[in-house]
Image (tube, rainbow, N blue to C red):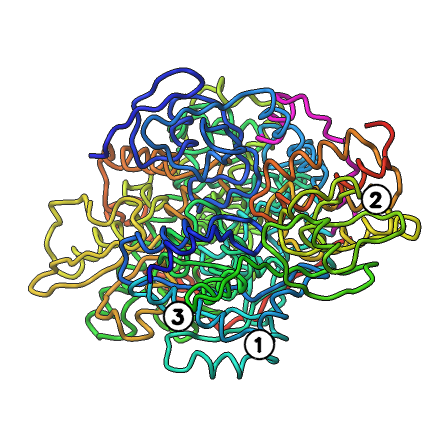
Amino acid sequence: MDIIKELKRHDILGRSGSGFPAHLKWQMVKNCNASQKFIVCNGSEGEPKNYKDKYILKKYPEYVVEGIKQALLAIPNSTAFFYLRKDYYRKFGRKLRKLSWGCDIEITKKIGRYLGGEETTICEAIETGTAEPRIKPPYPAQKGILGCPTLVSNVETFYCAGKIARGEYKGERFYTIEGGAKKRGVFKASKDATIKQILEETNNLPKFDFFVQAGGGAMGEILLPKELDKQIEGIGCIVVFNRKKTDPIKLMKQWAAFFLAENCDKCTPCREGIYRINEIISKKELDGKTLDDLFFVLEKTSLCPLGKNAFRPFETLIKKLGLCRKR
Amino acid sequence: MQKKISITINNKKYRVDGDKTILEVCKENRIDIPALCYHSDLDIKANCRMCLVKIEGEIGFKTACSTKVCDKMNITTESKEITRARKINLELIFSQHKEECFDCVWNYNCELLRLAKKYKVKINRFQDRKTKYPVYRFGNVIEFDSSKCIDCRNCVEVCHNQGVDFLEVKERGSLFQVLPSYKKNIDCIYCGQCITHCPAGAFETKDEFENIERPLKRKGKILVAQFAPSIRSSIGEEFGMKEGKIVTGKLVAALRKAGFDKVFDTSVGADFTTVTEAEEVVERIKQDRNLPILTSCCPSWVKYVEQRYPEFIPNLSSARSPQTILGALIKTYWAQENNINPEKIYVVSIMPCTSKKYEIERPQMKIQGMKSVDYVLTTREFARLLMKKKIDFTKLESEKLDAMFDSPSGAGIIYGATGGVMESAFRTAFEKLTGETLQKVDFKEIRGMKDIKEAEVKIGSGVKKIAVVNGLGNAKKLFDDIRAGKRYGYACIEVMACPGGCIGGGGQPIPTDEKIRIKRAESLYSIDRQKKVRKAHENPIVKRIYRNYFSKNQELAREILHTSYSRKPKGSVRKLD
């Protein structure tokens, strides 16, 4: 079976949040002319309130490992790393090692924190032990670990590949539902489902006035009930907030504190921008123009995806809840 | 030859080399792109996010420093959106930079200020977040004002490249900062490369501003100035003159105008260093003892050996550095000849080097209980002193040096460039070892900016292997290899801590980069070419002092010419209020 063709046929998009077509990435690494290539199964799951990878590792590890094996077969001269969050390493390490017995798969512990899950950071971390992002391009698919073409894909992406290889893939995707939802947890639903459908299917569509954060507990965008007829952009994670019971300033403070602690402080917009966003929110004086400017440089000029996406929850929350009149 | 490609920048077509970055191409074609964390000596980090450009067909901005040009690329370097992004990022950079422009090593010429004007930046849009950040003082030499740091991390990289790793990025609270290392065995070697590579003026020497006139306010003292070989081809840059311009005569005039009673040339001291070191080379080669012999006129290198490679301490040449020999000669022979009480002499050195400030405090550098050199001003500090005194350097008429230490050999001049000390020592040692006259004086194999230069020299019937290293990080590589037995068999090794040698020193004008270093070095070699006396031991004053003075005062000669070394604990790292 040509797994890359199959990934294309099933229209598998990367499940780490970026939504990049998996077959393109796999093909790129395959096409590179190199005597050594690397495959990384990214199990570093660091997005707050999201734990769908943990669920997959617990319930379906054999499919994930099967997916990695498929990648090893499809990409000549390759060896693989199973890059796991420390607690996942402790929990699932032994089982995964057993499953990947006889294959060229090394189970390793994540280095760093949140940013340690970003693809160039993973390459840097595996190579040098420091969790700092690299300048793109070159992309890991061109030059990753030790300058070799490196395929970094999410646990769920490999799960899909494994399922496809065994002819069992039915177009499913995993979603974490968290926050004020009635039934919290990880659910399987169609990859094409809208947010509303997912909430309905899982009996989680609130009766109270609410909003959701879709795409991750930190990076995700804020959506109002009327905006849920769309698919999730980002990680398969929906956090439900009771609009009456949620203090938006407090919520933003949590995000700001998270990004402040988790970014690497290397580039100006992310280091200083998030610092100032945190300052503005703490003072509760939401100055529209300043925030606009900060969001602009974060999105347009940050070095890595963390900075490029960190503005989104703030911007969408402020806009949609009308927190800042001057805008 | 690199393949030429066609690109478009701001609707204009260019034919350019295919392996260059957008920033390099724009620099060559005088298209202004702001870049703060970029330095041609360093890796591309792309973290200041100022060199943003737009490339047709690509989403968002790209950083010009990290993006290579490719055929048919269509680049826009100025637009409303680009200006907005640069402006906001600059405002954010200013929000972490305490402005103290009146006493900054950049002397109002910094890129930050230029860009602030260009992009009409409100530099106080955000309150400075670092106002309470401390100043750190490394030893008695370098100060790091962390409230000015813009986190570009150039200093950390250059410190690493120097093989020192004293400056580190550490997390404090939720922010990463540049901080001095508290590790016991990691110490600053005072090379000052952090100063010349910081775009924000966060580093300076101690007293670079406040006490700059102090050495001149010595009542009842005879003020004697000496200036290092490399100053004559660098100080002009501080006054807008061409890079590498030779300004010896103006420099002498400036020193007199600044208030010095006598002006001497440290290159004469270098001739004494050369002869002393050459004698030692001859002796050690004959006895096959403590080889390779290591040059010792770079105090940062000496400190590095004492702290990190103590097993090589016996290999260091015992010859004193040029400034300390000349200082000692001024306070002994010159004082005696002129009937002056040496206690009344105050010697100030104008040096390209920050570490020379540390060298003069070494107890082994004393002469008859006195300091050989009382004060060191760097090139930058002396230039600033002139500015403060409103002395227009460019308009000064050339003047001659004062008698006795006014006339160095060509060998003494080239001390300022990497390879120069070795070449000088070779010119002398060759003749002492073989008894023949050296015909081919130029030793081109060890000139130039290559990291580690190796050569084999035929002396009589034997062949000796030598190495010349510039940049302390390269010395680390070489000596790690020697330690591991991977390289061996050297007779002599010259090490200069700074890239390019003293012409690239930490006290030199800013900016300093490879192109500028090459020009400064070329000027020194051009002076050497024009000299009649090109060998240190043929310098008449050297001959005279050896014959008339040293031969009768051997004990004193030892004190003037030689020094000693020992293991050193970590120097002080203090947090100032």
**Foreground tag (2 vs 1):** 1
Please check whether the numbered discs 1 and 3 fall on a single chain. Answer: yes
Percent across and percent down for residue A233 are 63, 46
Q: Tell me the SS state at disc 1.
A: helix
Please check whether the numbered discs 2 and 1 fall on a single chain. Answer: yes
Please check whether the numbered discs 3 and 2 fall on a single chain. Answer: yes
Question: Is A134 placed above or below B264 here?
Answer: below
Q: How far apart are marks 3 and 2 (CA)?
A: 47 Å
Image point (43%, 73%), residue name: B310
Q: Mark 2 points at which residue?
A: A281
Q: Name the residue under label 1.
A: A89
**Region in magenta:** B110-133
Q: Is residue B502 left or right of residue B343?
A: left
Q: Can residue B553 be seen in this view?
A: no
The answer to which of B511 and B391 lies nearer the viewer is B511
> In the picture, residue B199 is in which quadrant?
top right
The residue under label 2 is which amino acid type?
A: Ile
Image point (64%, 46%), residue name: A231
Q: Tell me the SS state at disc 3.
A: helix
